[in-house]
Amino acid sequence: MNDRKSVPEPLTVEVDLDLIRRLDRNGPRYTSYPTADRFVEAFDAEAYRSWVARRNIGGIRRGLSIYVHLPFCSTVCFYCACNKVVTRDRAKGAKYLDYLLREIDLQGSLFAADRGVEQMHWGGGTPTFFSLDQLDRLFDALRRHFSFSNDGEYSIEIDPRSVDPAAMRGLRLLGFNRVSLGVQDFDPEVQRAVNRMQDETQTLAIIEAARDSGFSSVNVDLIYGLPKQSLLSFNRTLGRVIAAAPDRIAVYNYAHLPTRFKPQRRIAENDLPAPEIKLKLLALAVQRLTDAGYVYVGMDHFARPDDALAVAQRHGHLHRNFQGYSTHAECDLLALGVSAIGAIGPAYNQNHRELEDYYDALDRGQLPVARGLELSADDLLRRAVIQALCCQFQVSKRSIGIAYLVDFDKYFARELEELRALAGDGLLQLDDEWINVTPRGRMLIRNVCMVFDRYLQRERETMRYSRVI
């Protein structure tokens, strides 16, 4: 139920550095709730099979989204926290592809009666580590088992250093219609500090080639808080990216967690910008992008007003999943590849994180599901609230109460007390019907979501997560 009377205007956002400085803390990014660190090994391949078999009970047919994880990279970027395999040995990639095709065969048989795909994303790693012929072979295998909608969204992450205009045309011919490029920063000194030397001219040429090839959307990823980054250097990068006019721009916070991610140990901490400079880098990015006409979608994401993400948000259809923001809210997510995470009905599943374990399961003819979680009624309720906050920055108490058969104010009495403190800080406006996040509270939306996280309430354990800002 949605009792809003009209479609809202695009969101605005205010960067209050004093407020951010005071309230910044560690917290989840809420690409799922409960978060992946809550998954348990008791959820295995058989549990996964049972949920796939019940996927459309009651005649409600949910669409299907596919995520394919291709973890290989030719070189290591020191900032990276992805589950990846760094190698120049193409034979290792060929071996992985063979196993991935085995998994597709196993998964395809489970979805044989209900195979319509509306959305797909290939990530990594660097999917373009593989040749066009290899990617074509992979796409063909998926087409044998699944039926791809003619108006679906099919995206791939690329490293601009690994492709040329001909390769972009080839990717478009395979069937991809959206592309995401990693840029991070164009400044050579920053690039040297993170071991990612990337020619600006080549990158801009790939953006242009994507347009010329007929991609309907181009996304560019940037990172603030990298070593050697300054306000002057990042302002230059922002100007060059804005001039290239991608449809979407993501500006991620660099989370320096060297105890968890080994490549980050090669970054000199003295080279990292001071906390005050890092906050100003964020403020600069928000100012430059909004001045250039980009709409704030949420968390790290900006989009042109006519982009599908911005349109979905204005109409209340935006969704957040393991790949970030999405326009397909009602899809189940089929995960393929090592460490990939999926969602089928009220359950999450994750494949083995190590290649050896992934290969071993497939050698035994088993789905490589290592862990997952069946969501409780409380999980589903809290997930709906957190989704509404992340995607629309407002919650209708009446809508949640009707959908989940609860008295919102009674069920969340403790949470509402905590929200009143955030309202006192100017992050929220509360009334009998709505929770509304203010423009100055939107950059701190993770703080608001954390109030509803039952697992954090139980443990008060947040040090495992990155900083909110």
Image (cartoon, grey):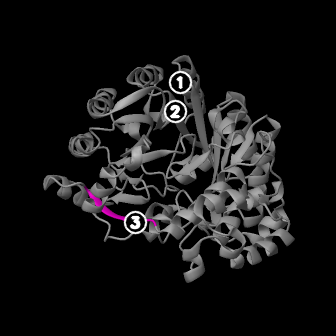
Cα separation, mark 1 vs mark 2, equals 7 Å
- Disc assigned to residue 373: 3
Cα separation, mark 3 vs mark 1, equals 36 Å
Residue 100: x %, y % from top left:
26, 44
Residue 254 seen? no
Name the residue furthest left.
364
Q: Are marks 1 and 2 in contact (CB under 8 Å)?
A: yes
The kind of residue on which mark 1 rests is Phe
Name the residue furthest top.
212
Q: Which residue is label 1 attached to?
A: 215
Q: Residue at x 63, y 40 (%)?
A: 186
Residue 461 seen? yes
Q: Quadrant of residue 277?
A: bottom right
Cα separation, mark 3 vs mark 2, equals 31 Å
User: Neighbour class for label 3 at 10 Å: few (<14), some, many (≥20)?
Assistant: many
Q: Quadrant of residue 30?
A: bottom right
Image: magenta residue range: 368-375
The kind of residue on which mark 2 rests is Val
Q: Which residue is label 2 attached to?
A: 179
In front here: 392 or 253? Answer: 392
